[in-house]
Amino acid sequence: MPDTKYAIVTGAASGLGRALSLELAKRGWVIALCDLNDEGSAETLELVRGAGGDGRVEHLDVTQPEEWEKLRDKLTADWPRLDLLVNNAGVGVGGEVGQLSLDDWKWIVDINLWGAIYGVHTMVDWLKANRGSHIVNIASMAAIVSAPSMAPYNVTKAGMLSFSETLFGELMPHGVGVTGVCPAFFPTNIINSGRFASDDQQKTAAKLMSSSKCTAEYVSQRILRAIDRKDLYVFVPRVATFFWRMKRLMPVRVLKMIARRNAEVAGAAVGQ
């Protein structure tokens, strides 16, 4: 079909990557479902086809630039263009600075930040060739609130947001849109794949996620609306927008508020 659109989604085997792939499928998109978990990606592909889209499973380690290059070469041979790149693959690390190993720092930076850098570096010329294409980078409200015991995650997500803002200006003359997505906590598999300095840190993160009323499906719908509107920012749900605005007005007060809240949640989680 002449109006078929083509997307690359990393971290597509589960969570937000799967939910967003299904929302794209409802619009008839063809999607390269990229992940290390091929079995999970195959399940996503089945769901994508059931929702009205199509696609392919692509094994991808986002930390390896040569794998990005192989992916580009395969897709350019089969697809007429690239309409959307979604840098969603990500992991979590929890613990205080000094408690966490440097290996944990490197692990999360390689996946959460370098993975997106490699992806854009490899695909950007292809995207520029198609005016109207788009890049979505999944950051987090963590980029704004800088909660204690989450320094590696905060740093990578702040980097993703800054990366998105920079790309927004660079790619505007080429007609390529950019969206940086900053959701608050919502249930995903990131806890299961994460690394934590202690069981208490993991319990705190799990409590924050389980208490959220936000869903991956809702975040995905907001992302698609942002793509349609060429919005740079997505803050979701409303609490994320609140903290974004308050941080700009009263940064120190917000950081103190977050520190106190973090201590309360940690104390409650440990007491369970």
Image (cartoon, helix red, strand yellow):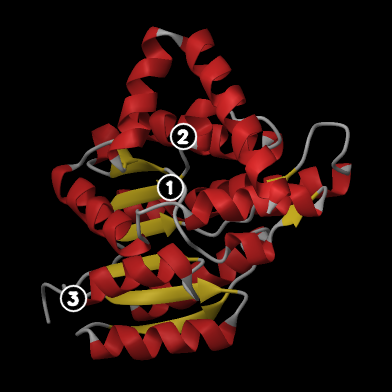
Q: Which amino acid is tagged 3?
A: Lys
Circle on res. 26: 3
Q: Earlier in the sequence, mark 2 or mark 3?
A: 3
Quick one: label 1, few (<14), some, or many (20+) residues within 10 Å?
many
**Residue 90 or residue 174, whichever sits in front:** 90
| Residue 208 horizontal side relative to residue 229, left or right | right
Decide if residue 131 is in sight here. Answer: no
Q: Secondary structure at mark 3?
A: loop
Q: Earlier in the sequence, mark 1 or mark 2?
A: 1
Decide if residue 252 is in sight here. Answer: yes
Q: Which residue is mark 2?
A: 161
- Seen at 60% across and 55% down, the residue is 206
- Rounded to the nearest angstrom, the CA distance separating label 2 from label 3 is 28 Å
Q: Earlier in the sequence, mark 3 or mark 1?
A: 3
Q: Which amino acid is tagged 2?
A: Leu
Give how far across and how far down residue 92 sits, in percent. Answer: 65, 52
Query: Taking 64 as reference, is 248 above or below it?
Result: above
Circle on res. 20: none
- Rounded to the nearest angstrom, the CA distance separating label 3 from label 1 is 21 Å
Quadrant position of the N terminus in the picture: bottom left
Report if the CB atoms under discs 1 and 2 are less than 8 Å apart. yes
- Seen at 15% across and 50% down, the residue is 228
Give how far across and how far down residue 74 sits, in percent. Answer: 48, 77
Circle on res. 137: 1
- Seen at 11% across and 76% down, the residue is 2
Quick one: label 2, few (<14), some, or many (20+) residues within 10 Å?
many
Quadrant position of the C terminus in the picture: bottom right
Question: Total number of numbered labels?
Answer: 3
Q: Which amino acid is tagged 1?
A: Asn
